[in-house]
Image (tube, helix red, strand yellow):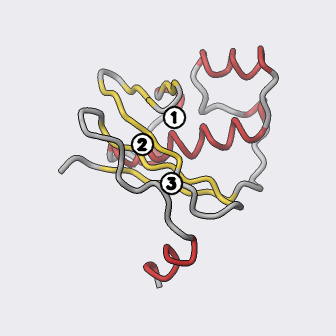
Amino acid sequence: MDAVGVDIERNTHQINSSTAFFLSKIEQQKLSAENLGNTYLLKKWVQKEAVSKAIGKGLSLGFHTIESSGTYCFWRNEKFMTHEVNVHPDYYCYVAGKTGKTKPEVSEISFEKLLNNLI
C-alpha cells in the first residue's frame, strides 16, 4: 500500500506573505502577480504538509521543494495527487498520495466523526 499523508489546519491561522518561505518560486510569483491572500497561503501549506507526510519526511522536508499545481504536487521525480476534504467549515484538510492510484476514496467526513475516532 502506498503511503498517504493528511493534514488539517484551522482556517483562522494567519500567514504573512513576506515570510511564506514554503512557497516555490513559481508559487511566489503567482502570489505576487495575482495578489492572493491568506486562504491561498494556508491551503498551500496544508496541501504541502499532507504531501510531505506521504513522502515520510513531515516538517523536516523543505516545503519550497514541493511544486503544487491544482490537485497535483511534484517533488523530485514523484507526482502526488491531493484532495481537499471538507471536514468542517473552520478547517482546511488535504489528503495526499502518490499518483498511479485513483483519487482518495474519502471525499467528506464529519468533524464530529473524525474527533470520535481520535478519542
Q: Name the residue under label 1.
A: 63
Q: Where 116 falls versus 89 (above or below)?
A: below
First in sequence: mark 3 or mark 2? 3
Residue type at mark 2: give it: Ser
Res 55 quadrant in image: top left
Residue type at mark 3: give it: Asp
Q: Tell whether 36 sits left or right of 53.
A: right
Residue type at mark 1: give it: Phe
Q: Tell whether 111 sits left or right of 56.
A: right
Q: Residue sitting at 49 percent across and 73 percent down?
A: 114
Q: Name the residue under label 2.
A: 52
- Mark 1 and mark 2 in contact? Answer it, CB < 8 Å: yes
Res 106 quadrant in image: bottom left
Q: Is mark 3 on a helix, strand or loop?
A: strand
Residue 81 location in percent, x, y?
A: 39, 36
Q: Name the residue under label 3.
A: 7
First in sequence: mark 1 or mark 2? 2
Residue 40 location in percent, x, y?
A: 70, 35
Cα–Cα gap, marks 3 and 1: 14 Å
- Mark 3 and mark 2 in contact? Answer it, CB < 8 Å: no
Neighbours of disc 2 within 10 Å: few (<14), some (14-19), many (20+)? many
Neighbours of disc 3 within 10 Å: few (<14), some (14-19), many (20+)? many
Q: Nearer the viewer, residue 40 or 106?
A: 106
Q: Residue sitting at 44 percent across and 49 percent down?
A: 95
Q: Is mark 1 on a helix, strand or loop?
A: helix
The mark closer to the camera, 3 or 1, is 3
Q: Count of labels shown? A: 3
Cα–Cα gap, marks 3 and 2: 10 Å
Q: Tell whether 86 sits left or right of 36.
A: left
Q: Residue sitting at 56 percent across and 57 percent down?
A: 8
